[in-house]
Image (tube, rainbow, N blue to C red):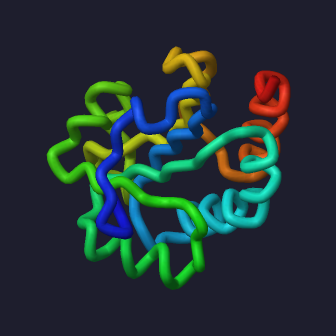
Amino acid sequence: MTSGKTFRLSDYQGKNLVLYFYPKDNTPGCTTEGIQFRELYPQFQAANTEIFGISRDSLKSHEGFKAKLDMPFELISDPDETQCIMFDVMKMKNMYGKQVRGVERSTFIIDGAGTLVKEWRGVKVPGHVDDVLAFVKTIAG
């Protein structure tokens, strides 16, 4: 994880977590999604919610992407696809007419008790972060 940290779910007990999986650092859709999470971050914090972005990119790539977008939350590097497989986000996708295996943009909400309470799969970026925020506000308690 960026900032030299290690992610442990138990460290966030009592907080809601947004885990958003995205295909690749520094690509248009992923940049837009990251910026939208950044812009609404104070509202997520007010709803007792922490955000983590996850992709297969290296930690070095993540550090650069995080700095470039001035993200106030951490990015998790998953080069061996452990988390991607656990959350079943690896899919065959069409890219320029070829079948390629990649991350399907997906978002998951884990509540303060550590329970997966909501998931979005095959996410389209426009409006998505607003939908995620609206949901976490309903469970912010």
Q: State the residue in front, 48 or 31.
A: 48
Could you tell whether 107 is left or right of 3 in the image? right
Q: Is residue 113 above or below residue 96?
A: above
Could you tell whether 87 is left or right of 20 in the image? left
Q: Which residue is rendered at x = 52% and y = 37% of the image?
A: 106
Quadrant (top left/top right/bottom left/bottom right) for the N terminus: bottom left
Could you tell whether 41 is left or right of 2 in the image? right
In the rendered image, residue 53, in percent from the top left (x then y), is placed at 48, 52
Q: Which residue is rendered at x = 61% and y = 16% of the image?
A: 117
In the rendered image, residue 140, in percent from the top left (x then y), is placed at 78, 29
In the rendered image, residue 102, in percent from the top left (x then y), is placed at 32, 46
> Which of the 4 image quadrants contains residue 57?
bottom left
In the rendered image, residue 4, in percent from the top left (x then y), is placed at 30, 66
Q: State the residue in front, 51 or 121.
A: 51
Q: Which residue is rendered at x = 27% and y = 67% of the image?
A: 59
Q: Is residue 46 above or below residue 117?
A: below
Q: Which residue is rendered at x = 36% and y = 54% of the image?
A: 76
Quadrant (top left/top right/bottom left/bottom right) for the C terminus: top right
Report the number of numbered marks.
0
Q: State the residue in front, 140 or 126.
A: 140
Q: Is residue 62 above or below residue 40?
A: below
